[in-house]
Amino acid sequence: MRCLLGGSTCWRNRLATQTLPERRSVSATIPSAVDVRLLGVRKTYGDVVAVDRVDLEVEAGEFFTLLGPSGSGKTTTLRLIAGFERPDEGRVELSGVDVTSRAPYERDVNTVFQDYALFPHMTVADNVAYGLRVKNVPRAERRQRVHEILRVIRLPDVGDRKPIQLSGGQRQRIALARALVNAPKVLLLDEPLGALDLKLRQEMQTELKRIQREVSEVGITFVYVTHDQEEALTMSDRLAVFNEGRIEQIGTPADVYEHPATEFVAGFVGVSNVLERDGRRFTVRPEKIQMHLDGTGAGEPGRIRDVVYVGMFTRYVVELDSGGELTVVKQNLETSSTDALESRGRPVRLEWRPEHTFDMERPGGQA
């Protein structure tokens, strides 16, 4: 950990002495707490507006996620930050410096992609050291930095192996190490876990967040792209929800989930029930609804139309007597799969607290 946290021969000192054009520019400016800033950025492809005047700030050392469905503009935004695309309008800043017209190699960023992009003929150590060799970093220093970053990703003994000898999760960590060893100011990650199976992806979410916490101490900011809501909620310090080229909401995972700013956010981040009352639209999360199986007591009367048993919880679809339907989620604390499935057709009553209902037409959302 000595190298990562600022020993005399390691990253922190090298960050201050790098000779990249970006580093020279930053040293001449007032230090900024914002590592990435987009100001009115717009990008079109013919008649298609991919990014529509986006304003965004990512704080130093933050794990910030760009979340949205396919075609929402999140990946194009990442490419604009990386320099792979140029905006039609607006400005891109890194650490307070305008880099809008700079090439990718002139920006203090590295990018990790879904396909790993490891050289199959090289050992793991040579793959990780590749960027350092390009920068003519001395051999002894390269070896030290490669050794340290392999320790950080918890693969200290694989340096002599070839990529084909590693699992998918291990290869993804090596791709991450190859980017991190260069100590970029900003690390961009374009759906890096998308090719992994569900269990491995969940394990890597935890591992990636651990790595981010460790390297954020030396000033590396993560900007992560995904369409997976669980991934975004699990790893992010903050996230931006994209839709049709625009940002619908920015906030912490808890803020975005518990207080959706728009109907799109309520429906895309998790599952929400949409209710109509007196010409207004409201949302309430399925897990916030209490369901009384005896059909008595207070609340909206209805009848269970469908049941989906999912192991840890059961999802119920309830037809309301007043019209429409609501989805309810209940943990299986005392309910077996047989009990759950046999509840189809039973009368129920549903109730929830007023503070768990959000008015989609009122600023702030609270009903």
Image (spheres, helix red, strand yellow):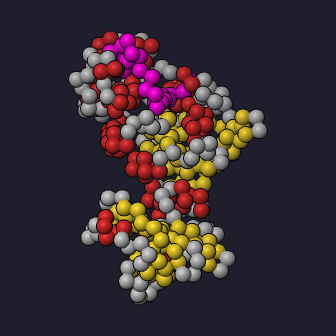
Identify the residue at horizontal 48%, vertical 20% (top origin): 19
- 107 in relation to 352, above or below: above
Q: Is residue 19 visible?
A: yes
Name which quarter of the figure residue 199 lies in. top left
Identify the residue at horizontal 37%, vertical 12% (top origin): 121
Q: Nearer the viewer, residue 332 or 243?
A: 332
On-image quarter of the C terminus: bottom right
The residue lying furthest to the left in this view is 157
- Residue 38 at x, y percent in the picture: 61, 41
- Residue 99 at x, y percent in the picture: 61, 31
On-image quarter of the N terminus: top left
Image position of 107 (left or right of 10): right
Image position of 55 (left or right of 349): right
Was residue 110 drawn as part of the magenta stretch in this picture?
yes
- 355 in relation to 298, above or below: above
Identify the residue at horizontal 40%, vertical 13% (top origin): 133
Q: Which residues are magenta?
A: 106-129
- 293 in relation to 259, above or below: below
Identify the residue at horizontal 58%, vertical 33% (top origin): 79
Image position of 269 (left or right of 90): left
